[in-house]
Amino acid sequence: MLLETEFLKAQAPGAVFVSTLALLGLFVLREALFQPIQDHGYPSPVVRVSPYELDISDIDAVKEIHRVGGHYRKADFYNNIGHRSIKTLFSTTDPHYHAIRRRLLSAGMAHTNLSTVEPLVYDRLQLTMNQMASEMRRRGVVDVFKWWTFMATDVIGELSFGQSFQTLEHGEKTQYVRDLENVSSFMAVRVTFPKLVEYSSFFPIPILRRVQQAGGRMAQYAQRAIKNYQSMIDKNPENPKQTLFTKMFNSGPDGLTLAEITPEAGGYIVAGSDTTAITLTYLVWAVCRNPAIRDKLVAEVNTLPSDFNKDHIRDLPFLNQVIHEALRLHSAVPSALPRAVPKEGATLAGYNIPGGITVSTQAYTLHRNADVFPEPQSFDPSRWEEPTKEMKHVFMPFGGGSRNNSSVTGVVFWSLIEEDEE
């Protein structure tokens, strides 16, 4: 790796790093979001962000790195996201394992299955609107991020475990939600200093102990919830309450065991709660601060029938443009997506990169490429009236190759406008 490091220093522009610096990881973590966007002022679209990692914003290179069926596996970074002994769809770096697990879990995310849970989402949304209206009457202001977080957590909990956390009903965080926040906030430390976490049982550090206890409680809750849902299926196998994992319980030897479903369900909650809440909060903020955009959007959604559904929402062009623009500027997952260069090496953006080096792409830089998005810092939904191929290629608000959930976001935003009109 020494030769590879010297190669990177000679070839790729970037800051000067001292490889023996003990806090290198912390520095990289702090700079991960903002330094690449500044450093990409270089003529080169490749920036060295550490001795063994390159940040890449070249469009063709990004397409190659995230190409379906490509050879850029997830970097070892992902091994530190969760418990090392448990592999999930999110944390595995094994392409074969990932493909099998994704095929099994994709049934729950299919359009037909999501349609069956649409009423559940709408019911939670209506309760969210009622709680926001109540807070507005009491305080004169609304903490929209709080309520979006409660809504997203309750919905994802019900879709994953078959039961809501009922944070919307109580209007306050449950123990599980507090544990989720502790574990999520510690994620950056976990992936940056994995050895610290590995040896945490030997160090009486309060924060490490709290996170360990929180993780233990979350695991116990998940196990109980999944077992309870299994009991519900056993009692009513013909018409069970639908979740993202229902078909996995009924797939026989081709399905997943309870022990395998539990961490996957927990991963969905971690990945789906904050991201949804952040996206919706920024969307509301961006629209409310621009009266012209707000008024045009209100006029469009007022054309919806009273019994609208997600198919009606797909036919609202301006609403979808607003959603895309909000996701561009305020992506829920704007940070690096590290991938390992194949062992034979690769040529990306004109650079010959040795095998094993980590190459990262991230939405924060890609979504602010002025050649693709003129005046990139401006919130301009009209840019999505006729998106170019380049815009589509670099648009990755939830990670490379993922699809945005604009229909669900649209339902939420329409209801918010309806509440405001009343």
Image (cartoon, rainbow, N blue to C red):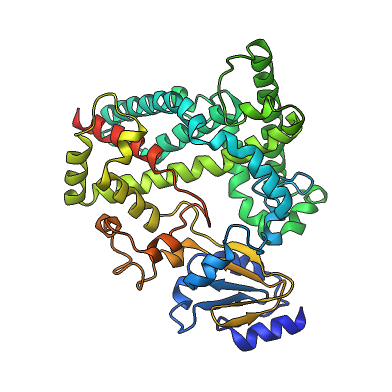
Position of 84 with respect to 146 (left or right) is: right
Q: Name the foreground residue: 62 vs 100.
A: 100
Q: Is residue 46 above or below residue 291?
A: below
Position of 250 with respect to 1 (left or right) is: left
Q: Is residue 320 above or below residue 2?
A: above
The residue sitting at 49% across, 73% down in the picture is 58
Q: How many marks?
A: 0
Snapshot quadrant of residue 29: bottom right
Image quadrant where one finds the N terminus:
bottom right
The residue sitting at 20% across, 27% down in the picture is 422
Position of 242 with respect to 140 (left or right) is: right
Q: Name the foreground residue: 378 vs 357.
A: 357
Q: Name the foreground residue: 108 vs 254.
A: 254
Q: Is residue 226 above or below residue 292?
A: above
* Percent x, y of residue 405: 43, 43
The residue sitting at 28% across, 60% down in the picture is 383
Q: Name the foreground residue: 252 vs 355.
A: 252
Snapshot quadrant of residue 219: top right
The residue sitting at 44% across, 47% down in the picture is 404
Q: Which residue extends farthest right?
A: 202
* Percent x, y of residue 15: 56, 81
* Percent x, y of residue 342: 70, 69
* Percent x, y of residue 361: 54, 66
Q: Which residue extends farthest bottom?
A: 10
Q: Is residue 43 above or below residue 63?
A: below
